[in-house]
Amino acid sequence: MPLKRALLLAPLLLTLFLLQSYFWVPTYEKQSVGNPERLVTYIEGSIGDAKILNPILHADTASATIVNHVFDGLLDLDENLNLRGRLATHWTISEKAYLLVNPDNRFPDGVEVTGERLLARIRRALKDGVLSEAASNILSIELLPPERQTHTFSLDEKAGTSGTREVDVTLTIPERLRFTLREVDQDFFKRLVPIIGDRYLLHFPYERYMEFPDGLTSEQKTHLHARVAEYLPVAEHNPEILFFLRKGVKFHDGHEFDAGDVKFTYEAIMNPKNLSPRTSDFEPIKYIDILDPYTVRVVYKRLFSPAINAWTMGILPEHLLNDEAMQREMDRRGLSEAARAAFGMRDSEFNRHPIGTGRFRFIEWHSDEFIHLERFEDYWEGPAEFKHYYMRIIPDLLTQEVEFRAGAVDYYGAQPHQVARYKKDPRYQSFSTLGFGYTYIGYNNRRPLFADPEVRRALGMAINVDEIITYLLYGEGERITGPYPKNTPWYDHSVQPLPYDPAGARRLLEERGWTLNADGWLEKDGKIFEFNLITNNGNPIRKNILTIAQNAWKKIGVKCNTQLFEWAVFLKDFVNTGEFDAVVLGWSMGIDPDLYQIWHSSQAGPQQLNFVGYNNPKADDLIVRIRREYNREVQQALAHQLHRLIYEDQPYTFLYAPLSTAVLDKKIVLVYHEPDGTERYEKIYPTKSGNIYFHFGRWRKLAFTPEF
């Protein structure tokens, strides 16, 4: 009998317990009752932990999120994707251009070239209006005297040397003209052709100006001639950026930021001991001059306009990471001599306890649990509205959503199929924004089957991309037509997507000799139009695209076989080697219009990013001109030309740009403080880049849901 009563009472007791829990546990709407700090605490979930909190070393998304809160760069992007000053208030870009005096050359009228004659003729041409295109850009011209310099070059097996050998070469640099230009001009030396002739830049007798140590072979000397030609070209562009730094900015430890920190950051990146993944971004720099504590001049070796975007990276505190500071850390940690010899910035405790100039300062990091930041009260732009920032490590997306709906985290990256539900829920604000990525089908242009652009166009016309967006992405995507992110100025919106036209696709293929055989497959010269389409495993959307494309092409008589591979195998055995017919992939792009690595024909080898083997000399020329152009309007016009050219060639079937989907509590708003002491609230909105965090310093959670 007691057992029977216990069994009868158990469900009742459980029900009472659940009821009291319902009334006792604070609801989402009342989570701040008794805990006002929750209103000034922002909690974000991350599927993975950070790795290293150093702006010159990190390479993962979680680390980047924290680093962007803790550090400032000299520049960043404004709401319209234009560069704006941060630690630099403003900057100017100009150029020094150098032209070697070549006595072996003659002017077009046959007169021998000397430095004085070259200078006089150019000045006279400017005065007479012969060089009208260059005249307004030239601020000054100087004739520099010869100078002797000694440089160390490395010889290796390519130069017929066993191992690596360091060689000191003495150069007698001949006379040079130095032009100070108001703006960077990639065509500057072409504008001098009426004076110097069209062959002046083709050859220079470097061998006359080099002194070698004894014992070098003729092969080694020839190798060094080429190295010196790279180091000292006949015509040299040296773009210069003059940064004017913000005064009164403090690091989180109270130390004042100045020009030394900028130069130190560059040197730390280029120090091979630190193994920075950002070396290539700063390699074009020739040297950095500190003109005064708040003025820095950055001189570049060559034309490379994307280089300025590198200065959006966070600046390091020199006083905490220079040689003296590193020595103190090694002493304090009692490192052995062997450990000291290998010690670099990657080994420093700074990477887990960063100190920057950003809006939030680092407090603590519990691995695989959370990272805690606190607002910096002395931030140069004013303290943030949120007092605390937490990144919680929540690897499971379902758990993230449960935590979000319970109010334990404030942000949820909703899946496309969830967006419609959240948009209808009055407790949340939902965002669907374009980012910098897109998805495509890439054809191996080296294969004879895909060599004709019209064949690639036909394959694209056979696919109903709108259905992919509707049924796979639940409408959370947009059609694209070319290689640039759709929300950047480089994307040409006048280019219309390929029409969905299976009949037109069939006609294009029939015009190229493909006819249906008895089995319903297109055939030409006894061969069926058949190929393999592959992608990586673990991505359900790409997997579904395989099936959709396969069925679409079957309808026009194209036989497509599909395969999935593990990511490592997919890259190693197929993409990196170029051993594939067609692939489904995507790019996550940047803001810069430089597409050299993805589309230039020189980048089509093994392990390179132009793995589809796209090759068009006109595109190559445009790509090079874009990366050498510093005028934004000219860059945009060139980028639009490149967009249209690649669209006409159809090396990819450009499918869609996915929308970034996010959900926030509706109580989180932008806060503006009025002169009379009152507060004004506005709804959070994304910038042109799709970034909802642009005004994060103004975010705060209210105790009520505002009406907008």
Image (cartoon, rainbow, N blue to C red):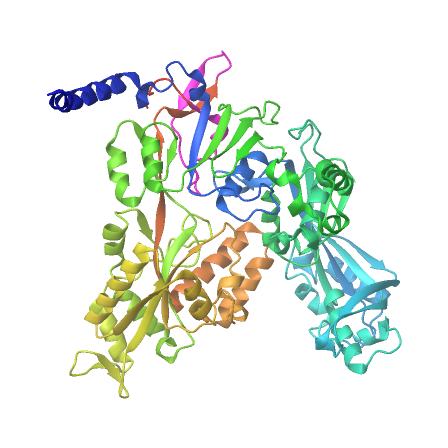
Please state the extent of the stretch shown in magenta in the rendering: 674-700
Is 314 left, or right, of 166 in this rendering? left
Q: Residue at x 22, y 82 (%)?
A: 515
Is 25 left, or right, of 157 in this rendering? left
Residue closest to the eye, 164 or 175: 164
Is 607 left, or right, of 272 in this rendering? left
Say whether residue 72 is visible.
Answer: no
Counting from the top left corner in percent of width and height, residue 322 is at 74, 41
Above or below 434: residue 364:
above
Counting from the top left corner in percent of width and height, residue 65 is at 50, 39
Does the stretch in magenta take in 680? Answer: yes
Is 536 left, or right, of 377 in this rendering? left
Counting from the top left corner in percent of width and height, residue 71 is at 59, 36
Q: Residue at x 57, y 43 (%)?
A: 52
Tell me the chief SS of the magenta region.
loop
Q: Residue at x 17, y 23 (%)?
A: 10
Residue closest to the eye, 12 or 118: 12
Does the stretch in magenta take in 177? Answer: no
The C terminus sits in image quarter: top left
